[in-house]
């Protein structure tokens, strides 16, 4: 389902910098009525349409407080994430990445699901090309993003019966603090934010928002993996996950 941003209420996690801040700005540019800019640290945003929101996605109590502060929600953008280099020698690296990039994405989605169901809204998960092709210097990150993609596909099938759309954004490297030290081509976050919301407005289930990821777009959408996802989604007997 396509979903125009104009007039909608949007919540962006990890909104204090990088892609998160660019998504806030882009939602405003498209006419969003209200944007909740969620982050672990206090933010000052000089725009009356932006409501700063203290939200640590690793803290269930903070998630509950955030839900109580949001009266209405059309679009949840799960952008908060972590990426730390590792060499497969320390299991705690996996636990750290999975805690933020997988479990807290699910926790935030479940917490805001009642509101999204009422608005017949959308969940937008910022995944990564690392989900389908591991970044060898970021193995724990890649594993967590592969899990995030699988979670997104499952949510898409399970929430369809509630009228909630679910999108996976599959960017390549973005020019943010997260990968600034990697000597690879990077896309400005503003470009990724613009292409992300373009994809939401066009109703693209997988959004490939930069020149690197765009090379995969046609093959993915017409490929065996996407067709298998559709077949598996048909197994869902319209039983949504519990809120």
Image: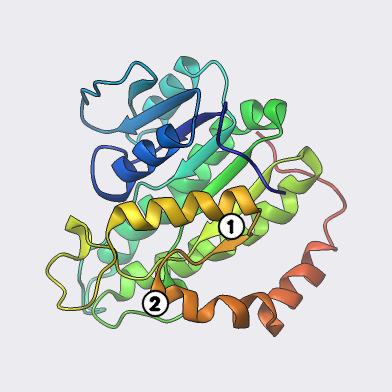
Q: Residue at x 39, y 77 (%)?
A: 212
Screen quadrant of the C terminus: top right
- Left-right relation of 43 to 212: left
Q: Residue at x 70, y 80 (%)?
A: 222
Residue 4 horizontal/vertical position (percent) = 61, 39
The answer to whether residue 46 is above or below residue 55 is: above
Secondary structure state at the residue bearing disc 2: helix
The answer to whether residue 205 is above or below residue 34 is: below
Q: Crowding near pointer 1: few (<14 within 10 Å), some, many (20+)?
A: many
The answer to whether residue 217 is above or below residue 128 is: below
Q: Separation of disc 1 and disc 2 at Cα?
A: 21 Å
Near-viewer residue (12 or 32): 32
Secondary structure state at the residue bearing disc 1: helix
The answer to whether residue 139 is above or below residue 29 is: below
- Counting labels gives 2
Q: Residue at x 25, y 49 (%)?
A: 18
- Left-right relation of 199 to 145: right
Q: Which residue is mark 2?
A: 212
- Left-right relation of 32 to 99: right
Q: Which residue is mark 1?
A: 152
Residue 208 horizontal/vertical position (percent) = 49, 67
Residue 15 horizontal/vertical position (percent) = 31, 38
Label 1 or label 2, whichever comes before in sequence order = 1
Near-viewer residue (174 or 6): 6
Q: Are marks 1 and 2 in contact (CB under 8 Å)?
A: no
Residue 126 horizontal/vertical position (percent) = 44, 55
Task: Say which of marks 1 and 2 sits in front.
Answer: 2
Q: Quadrant of residue 88?
A: bottom left
- Left-right relation of 57 to 199: left
Answer whether residue 57 is visible to the viewer in this image: no
């Amino acid at each position: 389902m396509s979903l125009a941003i104009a007039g909608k209420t949007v919540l962006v996690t990890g909104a204090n910098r990088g892609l998160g801040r660019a998504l806030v700005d882009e939602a405003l540019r498209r006419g969003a009525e209200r944007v909740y800019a969620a982050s672990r640290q206090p933010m000052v945003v000089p725009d009356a349409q932006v409501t700063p929101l203290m939200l640590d996605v690793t803290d269930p109590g903070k998630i509950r407080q955030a839900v109580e502060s949001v009266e209405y929600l059309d679009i949840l953008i799960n952008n908060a994430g972590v990426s730390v280099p590792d060499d497969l020698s320390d299991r705690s690296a996996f636990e750290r990445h999975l805690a933020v990039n997988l479990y807290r994405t699910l926790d935030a989605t479940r917490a805001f699901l009642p509101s999204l169901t009422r608005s017949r809204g959308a969940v937008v998960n910022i995944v990564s090309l690392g989900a389908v092709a591991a970044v060898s210097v970021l193995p724990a990150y890649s594993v967590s993003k592969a899990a995030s993609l699988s979670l997104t596909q499952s949510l898409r099938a399970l929430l369809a019966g509630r009228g909630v759309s679910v999108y996976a954004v599959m960017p390549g490297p973005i020019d943010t603090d997260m990968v600034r030290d990697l000597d690879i081509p990077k896309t400005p976050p503003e470009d990724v934010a613009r292409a992300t919301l373009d994809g939401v407005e066009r109703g693209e289930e997988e959004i490939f928002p930069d020149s690197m990821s765009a090379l995969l777009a046609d093959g993915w959408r017409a490929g065996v993996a996407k067709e298998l996802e559709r077949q598996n989604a048909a197994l869902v007997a319209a039983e949504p996950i519990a809120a």
